[in-house]
Image: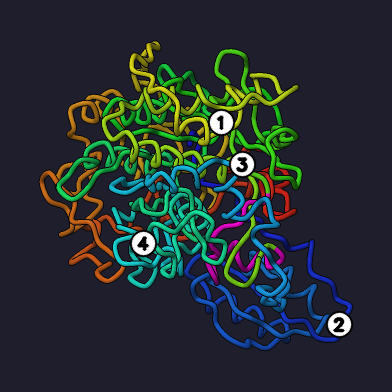
Amino acid sequence: MATMLMLWPALAVSRGAAPSAAALHLSLIVRGAQGAAEATAAAVRDAGGAVVRRLDIIDGVLADIAATDLGRLASDPRVRMITEDGPVHLAAARWNPTKDTGSAYDTTLMSGAQAYWRAGYTGQGIDVAVLDSGVAPVEGLSAPGKVLNGPDLSAESQAPNLRYLDTFGHGTHIAGIIAGRDTAAVAGQYAGDSADFIGMAPDARIVSIKVADSWGQTDVSQVLAGIDWVVQHHADPGLNIRVLNLSFGTDSYQSYLVDPLSYAAETAWHSGVVVVAATGNAGWKTGVLDPASNPYVIAVGATDAHGTTTLADDTVATFSSGGDGYRNPDLIAPGSHIVSLRDPGSHLDLAYPSAVVAGRFFRGSGTSQATGVVSGAAALVLSQHPLFTVDQVKALLTGTASALPGQPAGLAGAGELNLNTALTALPPLTAVQVWAPSTGTGSIEGARGSVHLTWNSVQLSGEVDIFGSPISTSTLASQLTNGQAWARGTFNGVAWTGDGWLDNEWACTTWTASSWSGDQWSGNQWSGNQWSGNQWSGNQWSGNQWSGNQWSGNQWSGNQWSSASWD
């Protein structure tokens, strides 16, 4: 997250690239600033259009407007994005998951996950923390006990109707890859079931830690708070967080040896949590993103199956970031054209209707997806070997990976994930990693890298958190090491939560009890907090870009993140 985050593509405001005006009237999805749906509706009416219905979850409206008025609407400063509304055709009768190498069925079959299921290892008893944009309770993630909500550290935590929920669409997609499971799927009969959606580790539990809003926006300080929460609470009563999925990264300006984000990920690793991080999507350029740059964690690149079900012709995906010879990807995993759960009405869902598959699924490509595959694989390994250390998990996954012909280690690492081999391999009993440890004493600003949250032309920068409170990285590193980074809902001296926090445990919530009591940020509410005298309530990335290094995955079903922004 170096610059983190935003966690992913930036919100591309496409005013000049308007939809086709061939028809007399156009049906459009029009988005405005965060929390400004009414202003967006007014812009439509002022341009001569009609508001068909409000879409408050994405701060927008469905509009009907004459093609001749489109230019006026697109130039209105209240409008951030315009996309064509289009019909979604259910394709269940035409789409066959056994014939789609990106489907969950084929991904779990080719990776060897189904071999683990047949042997009785399904991720049972393992919690996987997903630090992302939240999780929507869609079918496949709605079974009782499937998803547990940790803290919502995003700006949307202040809106009761949005708290914990995924309004962006990324977190739901990744959670489905890791541990999705349709309610109709029968325990003990997962292998060979192509009728139900089943992710890599179907009996693992997702612990969702929301840090990003509907635009995918967040800051390094929020991500640090999320990782620090995992470190401090992973073994609380009722929790068994053994894996942490980080499907994002930043172009940090500093070495892993001092970077605070790298330090947080490394501390999670040493606390017994397998950290799985995306290498990035710079297109085979050298250098993986932060925190995958830390040599302790598992850095994951993506493969392209080229439409076949064998590993022999797999290659490193063209978008997958390579290493620099010192820090390379540890291994690669399926990451091209991956089909997972759709989050209806989310930003990505509305922006890319062509990515919808069979009505309830969504197709995406990137190291985000590959990271989700490996996180699920780690949960399977831990259900087979619950006493494995984090280093043993990494050694088994990398030691049994399949080398790809003609793919250099700088791009492929040890090779492609192969759970078929891992299932029967001898346990790596002596696996111990010894790397120079990070100190975490570098700068927050350096961890942000090249992109910053900006509001009213004022940039969030320097050694401050999202509230504008000063951060001492040396103090924060010490607190994290000692398990004191969080204290009754206070992080970096600011109360971020309310009654949900206890001294040494977190009252995690489920879908049926997903609200806190008194969950104000103790007077430090987003709508009232300031940095440099400017409020942050609807911030956006300066320039709407993320320095060419997106969340993970340069593509969503053929829609590339050109220059790190959604086209």
**The image quarter in which residue 230 lies:** top left
Q: Residues within 10 Å of mark 2 (few under 14, many from 20)?
A: few
| Disc 3 from disc 1: Cα separation | 23 Å
Q: Amino acid at mark 3?
A: Pro
> Vertically, is 536 above or below 342?
above
Q: Amino acid at mark 1?
A: Asp
Eye-nearest disc, 1 or 4: 4
Mark 1 vs 4, N-terminal side: 4
Helix, strand or loop at mark 4:
loop
In the rendered image, the residue lying farthest to the right is 22
In front of the other: 213 or 182: 182
Please name the residue shown 33% across and 52% down the image.
207
Where does residue 122 sit, x and y in percent of width and height?
39, 48
Q: Which residues are magenta?
A: 337-354
Q: Which label sits on residue 23?
A: 2
Please name the residue shown 51% across and 29% down the image.
299
| Disc 1 from disc 2: Cα separation | 43 Å
Look at mark 3 in the image and give the residue it sits on. 334
Q: Residues within 10 Å of mark 1 (few under 14, many from 20)?
A: many
Helix, strand or loop at mark 1:
loop
Q: Which label sits on residue 251?
A: 1
Where does residue 181 sit, x and y in percent of width and height?
44, 61
Q: Which label sits on residue 164?
A: 4
Instruction: Check if mark 1's residue and mark 4's residue have beta carbons within 8 Å.
Output: no
Instruction: Check if mark 3's residue and mark 1's residue have beta carbons within 8 Å.
Output: no
Please name the residue shown 56% across and 31% down the image.
251
Helix, strand or loop at mark 2:
loop
Q: Amino acid at mark 2?
A: Ala
Residue 132 is at least partly visible in this image? yes
> Vertically, is 226 above or below 28?
above
Q: Is residue 140 left or right of residue 243?
A: right
